[in-house]
Image (tube, rainbow, N blue to C red):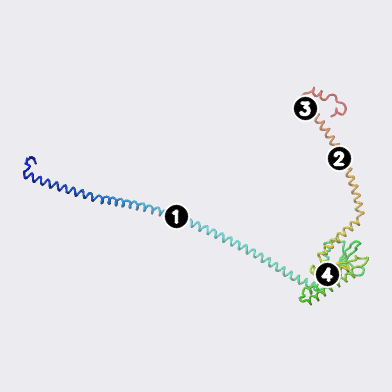
């Protein structure tokens, strides 16, 4: 017996059976629904997890997009700053390049101006040198004109000889264009003492023969030029030996002056026989260089001769000098003796000063007994010290 809605029913009552059947059906449906729900829940869990993962990914993508947007913003700002720095650097570099180019152009222009100035000065120097060359060419032509004439060539040698003699000897030891007893006029006469006596220097210049030697191209021309040179030199040697070596008046030799070192070198190189003939005739050939050396030797001879001439006066002066030296020695001895006496007097004065100082110090300290015992009776010169 059961009660439904306050109404008792038996277990076998159709109502109870129908109700039980309905209740069982409802329970079965609920059970089936529950199972279906459970299966649906099981099947929906992966979908939910996938949905959650997709939601998470979408969120991550959103965050990444935000970070990407922020990164792009920072990149844009950094790029803007970099572009600004690059522009500033480029402007600075351009300014430096412009400054360097300006300085380089200024330096180039300065150097160019300096170079132009130097070039102008060099051109002026070249112009002056050209003018000097033209003047020198004119002088050379004039010299050629002078040397082409025998008289002017002789004057040229005499002038050069006079210049050398003037530099080497005192003025009173020679005479230019001196006339000898035979009426001949010597270019230069050196007044040497006897022996050897006065010696003559005569200037000669065999220019034609020397030029023929220089122009000779064939053996025949060379032989002819040598013959002319040898003949000219021998003629000069004979003329000097005959005219300027006078017994009792001049030395037994004379000098032939060649005003050209080239002619002198040619003579000694290729004409030794002529040089030996000059030695035999006592005519010594000299060039400007060897003439200067010879004149310096003559100057020493003149100096020695003058010293011999003044030997008496020198001995007299030496005697007077010896007397002066003896007198000076005696006066030095007297002065030394006076100095010794003065030193002795100064020492005695120093001793007296020390004694007076000690006495004054004792008097200042009232040491009368010590003064009396130290001094004692003073007798003679010591009392005055």
Instruction: Determine crowd level at label 2: few under 14, some 14-19, many 20+ residues with C-alpha closer than 10 A.
Output: few
Q: Report crowding for label 4: few under 14, some 14 to 19, many 20 or more residues within 10 A (C-alpha).
A: few
Question: Which marked residue is nearer to the observer: mark 4 or mark 3?
Answer: 4
What residue did someone put label 3 on? 361
Name the spot of residue 215 as percent of width and height, x first.
77, 74
Disc 2 secondary structure class: helix
The quadrant of the image that shows the N terminus is top left
First of labels 1, 4 by sequence position? 1
Secondary structure of the residue carrying numbered label 3: helix
**Could you say whether the residue bearing mark 4 is in a helix, strand or loop?**
helix
The answer to which of marks 4 and 3 sits earlier in the sequence is: 4
Q: Is residue 339 above or below residue 165?
A: above
Viewer-proximal residue among 43 and 110: 43
> Within the image, what quadrant is residue 335 found in?
top right
Structural distance between the alpha carbons of marks 3 and 1: 101 Å
Which mark identifies residue 82? Answer: 1
The answer to which quarter of the image holds residue 237 is bottom right
* Mark 4 vs 2, N-terminal side: 4
Give the total of numbered labels.
4
Disc on the earlier residue, 3 or 1: 1
User: On the image, numbered disc 2 is attached to which residue?
Assistant: 336
- Residue 331, relative to residue 355: is it above or below? below
Between the C-alphas of marks 1 and 4, the distance is 99 Å
Q: Which residue is mark 4?
A: 272
Tell me: 43 left or right of 316. left
Q: Considering the numbered disc 1 on the image, is that residue within a helix, a strand or a loop?
A: helix
């Amino acid at each position: 017996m059961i009660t439904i809605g306050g109404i008792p029913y038996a277990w076998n009552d159709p109502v109870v059976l129908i109700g039980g059947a309905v209740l069982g059906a409802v329970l079965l449906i609920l059970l089936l629904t529950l199972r279906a729900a459970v299966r649906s829940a099981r099947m929906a869990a992966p979908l939910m997890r996938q949905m959650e993962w997709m939601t998470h990914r979408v969120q991550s993508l959103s965050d990444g997009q935000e970070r990407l947007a922020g990164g792009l913003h920072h990149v844009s700002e950094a790029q803007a700053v970099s572009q600004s720095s690059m522009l500033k650097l480029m402007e600075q570099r351009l300014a430096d390049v412009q400054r360097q180019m300006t300085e380089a152009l200024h330096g180039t222009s300065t150097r160019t101006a300096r170079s132009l100035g130097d070039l102008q000065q060099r051109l002026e120097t070249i112009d002056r040198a050209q003018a000097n060359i033209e003047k020198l060419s004119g002088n050379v032509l004039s010299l050629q004109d002078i040397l082409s004439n025998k008289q002017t060539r002789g004057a040229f040698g005499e002038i050069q000889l006079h210049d050398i003699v003037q530099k080497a000897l005192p003025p009173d030891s020679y005479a230019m264009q001196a006339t000898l007893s035979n009426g001949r006029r010597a270019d230069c006469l050196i007044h040497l003492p006897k022996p050897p006596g006065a010696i003559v220097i005569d200037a000669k210049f065999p220019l034609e023969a020397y030029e023929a030697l220089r122009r000779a191209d064939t053996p025949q021309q060379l032989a002819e030029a040598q013959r002319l040179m040898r003949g000219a030199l021998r003629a000069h040697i004979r003329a000097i030996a005959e005219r300027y070596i006078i017994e009792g008046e001049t030395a037994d030799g004379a000098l032939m002056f060649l005003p050209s070192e080239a002619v002198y070198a040619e003579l000694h190189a290729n004409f030794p026989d002529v040089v030996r003939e000059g030695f035999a005739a006592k005519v010594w050939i000299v060039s400007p260089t060897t003439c200067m050396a010879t004149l310096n030797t003559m100057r020493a001879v003149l100096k020695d001769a003058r010293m011999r001439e003044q030997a008496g006066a020198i001995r007299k002066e030496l005697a007077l000098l010896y007397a002066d030296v003896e007198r000076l020695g005696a006066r030095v001895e007297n002065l030394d003796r006076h100095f010794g006496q003065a030193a002795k007097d100064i020492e005695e004065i120093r001793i007296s000063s020390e004694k007076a100082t000690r006495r004054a110090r004792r008097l200042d300290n009232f040491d009368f007994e010590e003064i009396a015992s130290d001094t004692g009776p003073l007798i003679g010169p010591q009392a005055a010290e």
